[in-house]
């Protein structure tokens, strides 16, 4: 089923690129690519690695909570592997892969790592919404403020519910424990790990640390994209770079194609077009930057994965099992 999704996603990406290529001048696109200052993109890659490092640290803080010990072993490697895998695999399977790598070296249950990861990533969704709301205030046609406010309310409500469960887990654990036989035992262990992954949401000091890491992540991401735009001789300022990062981030939250190929270029055209950038130059930027990022990120992720000396099947087999515990 996953491979079917991958094939369908690849077909959709090819269709989008085909339609976009019919609407641009290939010679103009090639000229923009040829005149780009590719050396600047090395700086962009360094900033991207810094962003991935901060995401890993944020993840470790979320896993540990106020009183736990942060997982340290292969944290950056796991984050880089997961980021690279998300560029190639559908349905954000890279998140699962990086949780498995972290679990292998730090004995962190996969369920706990995943819930902590997804909860921390919710702050990225909030950052996207705030940036798009700011953009919509300046340009009402950019995005629906009503829809953005609904998303904001949904994320905040989900966070509050998760924080309540994390602070008062006994009721949920008792309800799960009432399930019959082995099912109740298994789900009790999974629920306990899940609640541990959400625990930081009910701890204000840890929550503040996660927010600060999120600010650092987005500062690096916006700065990196601003430099990338300048490398392609496109000047839309920091506000334009911030809006483009937000739009790309929103598309990666629910990816339609592997690595967002096709949708990445479409977003570049739509957002940059509002800043007076013509279709040819916007498409060339989206094509060139994504190709460069895909090659460098996958190469780094592949290096770290090979360093593990494992295949995907072996990684699952060698990771210590999660043993459900009775409450």
Image (tube, rainbow, N blue to C red):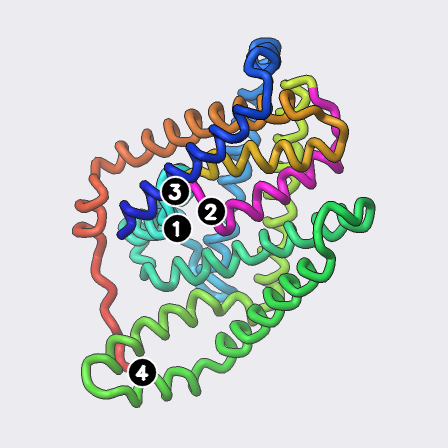
What crowding class fits label 2: few (fewer than 14 Cα within 10 Å), some (14-19), or many (20 or more)? many
282 vs 259: above or below: above
Marks 2/4: CA–CA distance: 37 Å
Q: Residues within 10 Å of mark 4 (few under 14, many from 20)?
A: few
What stretch of residues is rendered in magenta?
234-257
Q: Nearer the viewer, residue 20 or 324?
A: 20
**In the image, which disc is placed on residue 9?**
3
Relative side of 55 to 91, left or right: right
* Residue 12, horizontal then vertical, whole percent: 42, 39
Residue behind mark 2:
255
Q: Earlier in the sequence, mark 3 or mark 4?
A: 3
Q: CA distance from mark 1 to mark 4?
A: 32 Å
The residue where tag 4 is placed is 327
Label 1 residue SS: loop
Q: Residue at x 65, y 67 (%)?
A: 153
Say which label, 3 or 1, has the lower sequence index: 3
Point out the frontmost of discs 3 and 4. Answer: 3
Residue at mark 1:
91
Determine the secondary structure under disc 2: loop
Check whether the beta carbons of the residues at disc 1 and disc 2 lie within 8 A of each other.
yes
In the figure, is residue 114 to the left or right of 306? right
- Residue 270: image quadrant is top right
The image position of residue 175, as x and y in percent, is 37, 87
Q: Residue at x 57, y 68 (%)?
A: 159
Q: CA distance from mark 1 to mark 2?
A: 7 Å
Above or below, comparing residue 302 to residue 145 in the picture: above
Pick the residue in front: 288 or 208.
288
Mark 3–mark 4 Cα distance, whole angstroms, equals: 42 Å
* 256 sits left or right of 107 in the view: right
Mark 1 vs 2, N-terminal side: 1
């Amino acid at each position: 089923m996953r491979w079917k999704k991958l094939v369908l996603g690849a077909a959709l990406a090819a269709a989008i690129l085909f339609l976009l290529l019919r609407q641009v001048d290939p010679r103009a696109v090639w000229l923009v690519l040829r005149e780009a200052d590719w050396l600047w993109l090395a700086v962009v890659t360094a900033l991207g690695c810094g962003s991935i490092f901060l995401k890993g640290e944020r993840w470790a803080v979320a896993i540990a909570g106020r009183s736990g010990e942060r997982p340290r072993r292969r944290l950056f490697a796991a984050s880089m592997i997961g980021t690279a895998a998300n560029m190639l695999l559908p349905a954000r399977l890279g998140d699962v892969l990086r949780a498995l790598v972290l679990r292998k070296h730090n004995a962190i249950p996969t369920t706990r790592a995943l819930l902590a990861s997804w909860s921390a990533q919710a702050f990225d969704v909030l950052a996207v919404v705030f940036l798009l709301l700011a953009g919509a205030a300046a340009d009402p046609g950019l995005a629906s403020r009503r829809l953005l406010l609904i998303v904001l309310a949904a994320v905040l409500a989900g966070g509050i519910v998760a924080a309540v469960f994390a602070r008062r887990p006994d009721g949920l654990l008792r309800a799960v424990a009432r399930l019959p036989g082995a099912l109740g035992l298994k789900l009790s262990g999974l629920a306990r790990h899940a609640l541990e992954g959400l625990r930081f949401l009910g701890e204000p000091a840890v929550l503040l640390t996660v927010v600060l890491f999120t600010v650092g992540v987005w500062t690096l991401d916006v700065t990196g994209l601003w430099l990338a735009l300048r490398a392609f001789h496109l000047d839309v300022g920091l506000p334009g770079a911030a809006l483009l990062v937000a739009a790309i981030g929103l598309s990666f939250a629910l990816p339609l194609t592997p690595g967002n190929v096709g949708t990445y270029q479409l977003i570049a055209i739509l957002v940059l077009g509002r800043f007076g950038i013509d279709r040819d130059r916007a498409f060339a930027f989206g094509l060139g930057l994504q190709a460069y990022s895909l090659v460098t990120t996958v190469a780094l992720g592949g290096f770290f994965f090979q360093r593990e000396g494992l295949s995907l099947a072996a990684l699952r087999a060698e990771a210590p099992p999660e043993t459900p515990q009775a409450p």
